[in-house]
Each structure stands twice: as C-alpha cells, then as structure tokens.
Amino acid sequence: MSNPLPPVSSAPLIVVGAAIVNDRGQVLAAQRAEPPALAGCWEFPGGKVEPGESDVSAIVRECREELGVEVELVERLGPDLPLQRDFGVLRVWIARLAEGEPTALEHAALRWLDATELDDVAWLPADAPLIDELRVRLAEW
Ligand code: 9L3
Ligand code: MG
C-alpha cells in the first residue's frame, strides 16, 4: 500500500533573517520577488536553515547567495516568530557588513531605512512584529 502523505521531517523548519545595520544606523530591507503571494512585500533577507547547518552559518550563507556580501552577526533581534505558510519559525539576527555592498541578486529591490523610515515599506507578516524593537535599536545605534 502506498502512503499518500509525504515523509515527515523530525527537524523543525527554521528560517533565518538578517537585519543588516550600517554605520549610519540604517537597516537593509529587501523586497521579495517571489512567490507571487509574497512578491512586493519587504523582509529581512535570509532563508531556510539546511539540515546539519547552524542558524548562524545559514545567515552567512544566505547573505552571500542573496546579496553577495559577507556579514558578521551582532545579536538576536526579538524571539522566534511563527511562520504561517511554512509551519516553522523565523529567527532574525542583527548583523553588520564585513565585506561588499548588498546587491539584489534574488530580490526585486533593496532599501536602507533609518529608524524614522521603518513604516515606509510593507513588511511580510512574519517580520512585522520585529519592527518596533528594531526602531528602538536603530535609534540607539
Ligand atoms: N520568510 C519570512 N521572512 C523572512 C524570510 C527570509 C523568509 N525574513 C518566509 C518566506 C518564505 C519562507 O520563509 O515563505 C522561506 O524563505 P525563502 O527561503 O523563500 O527566502
Ligand atoms: Mg530567501
């Protein structure tokens, strides 16, 4: 008999994001190009932690792949937040640029936002709960 359900992974899905802050206290927002349901919304760039990978390594890898930059992580931003579409969690770290200038290799657009501009873009529902804490952190940066 064939099982109609796909194999269930025991590892919880963790999606990581990078709130990259520059020396002027601005954070990098990235506009999604896909999937259609999320396209046009803004996020902290990142993606899924792969099996056997740490969250920190995943952020460094995703920033290379999506932005062409090297980052170094500073500290966590907020708690793990629920990801409704993927039944996982979003885990965001504050990061600094170590090398390179971000390029939209996979995103539709990139913007540097200061503390007063954080509400100027439509954040993904998963990322939006982090914005109030980020505003405080940028104001103190
Ligand atoms: N997601 C939400 N907020 C974020 C990121 C990086 C990702 N800051 C969601 C969007 C997708 C899923 O997580 O549904 C996987 O992300 P990706 O691998 O498509 O970037
Ligand atoms: Mg991604």
Image: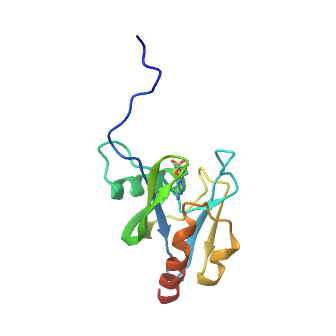
Q: Position of residue 26 (x, y in %)?
A: 56, 78
Q: Position of residue 76 (x, y in %)?
A: 38, 70
Judge from the rendering whether residue 139 lies leftward or rightward of residue 61; answer left or right: right
Q: Position of residue 116 (x, y in %)?
A: 64, 84
**Farthest-out residue, top:** 1
- Residue at point 55%, 74% (across, down): 131
Q: Is residue 65 above or below residue 6?
A: below
**Farthest-out residue, bottom:** 140
> In which image quadrant can residue 24 be found?
bottom right
> In which image quadrant can residue 79 be found?
bottom left
Q: Nearer the viewer, residue 7 or 123?
A: 7
- Residue at point 61%, 56% (across, down): 104
**Farthest-out residue, front:** 1
- Residue at point 60%, 50% (across, down): 106
- Residue at point 59%, 82% (across, down): 115
Q: Nearer the viewer, residue 25 or 76?
A: 76
Q: Position of residue 63 (x, y in %)?
A: 47, 57
